[in-house]
Image (cartoon, helix red, strand yellow):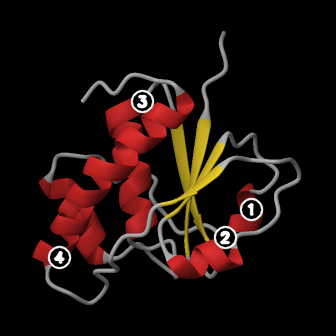
């Protein structure tokens, strides 16, 4: 069986942008790529707006839960994507060199559902193709 590349999407709270990005990459690029997300200071739960936006788009939210970056540091990660400036500044040093890219997105936390949908669409338009290109896979969706 060939290696399935893993992308880690890193944010501060791991409750919104990184969760939507994880779900979108897994939906649009799976099973060619495995996405996981984590936070430098994870929140207790995924934002309701992020869940609602993904569900509205017909994307599964099963298994989405905030995780601390320390919990995934030892994993086999092929690419790190930071989606907020704070996570970029606090990005830890991984046990081995890992390519990274910074793609910041607006934080819709506390805003209406339309803001979450807009950010989700921006993530899908910018982050998903970037991950596909960097990991050398074809975007299906």
The residue that disc 2 covers is 68
The residue that disc 4 covers is 115
Q: Is residue 56 left or right of residue 79?
A: left
| Image point (82%, 64%), residue name | 93
Could you say which quadrant of the image residue 123 lies in? bottom left
* Cβ atoms at labels 2 and 1 below 8 Å apart: yes
In this orientation, does residue 33 appear? yes
Labels 4, 1: front one: 4
Q: Distance from label 2 to label 1 (Cα)?
A: 6 Å
Quick check: 129 above or below 3?
below
The residue that disc 1 covers is 71
Residue 120 x %, y %: 25, 60
| Image point (76%, 46%), residue name | 75
SS for callout 2: loop
* Cβ atoms at labels 2 and 4 below 8 Å apart: no
Of labels 1 and 3, earlier in sequence is 3
Q: Distance from label 4 to label 1 (Cα)?
A: 30 Å
The residue that disc 3 covers is 30
Could you say which quadrant of the image residue 140 lies in? top left
109 and 101: which is toward the camera: 101
Q: Distance from label 3 to label 2 (Cα)?
A: 23 Å
Is disc 3 surrounded by few (<14), some (14 to 19) or many (20+) residues within 10 Å? Answer: some
């Amino acid at each position: 069986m060939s290696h399935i590349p893993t992308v880690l999407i890193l944010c501060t709270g791991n409750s919104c942008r990184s969760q939507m990005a994880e779900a979108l990459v897994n939906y649009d690029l799976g099973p060619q790529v495995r996405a996981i997300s984590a936070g430098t200071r994870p929140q207790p739960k995924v934002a309701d707006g992020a869940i609602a936006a993904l569900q509205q788009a017909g994307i599964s939210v099963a298994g989405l839960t905030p995780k601390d970056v320390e919990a995934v540091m030892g994993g086999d990660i092929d690419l790190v994507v930071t989606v907020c400036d704070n996570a970029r500044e606090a990005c830890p040093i991984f046990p081995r060199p890992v390519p990274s890219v910074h793609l910041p997105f607006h934080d819709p936390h506390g805003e209406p559902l339309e803001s979450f949908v807009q950010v989700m669409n921006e993530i899908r338009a910018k982050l998903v193709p970037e991950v596909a290109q960097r990991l050398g896979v074809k975007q299906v969706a």
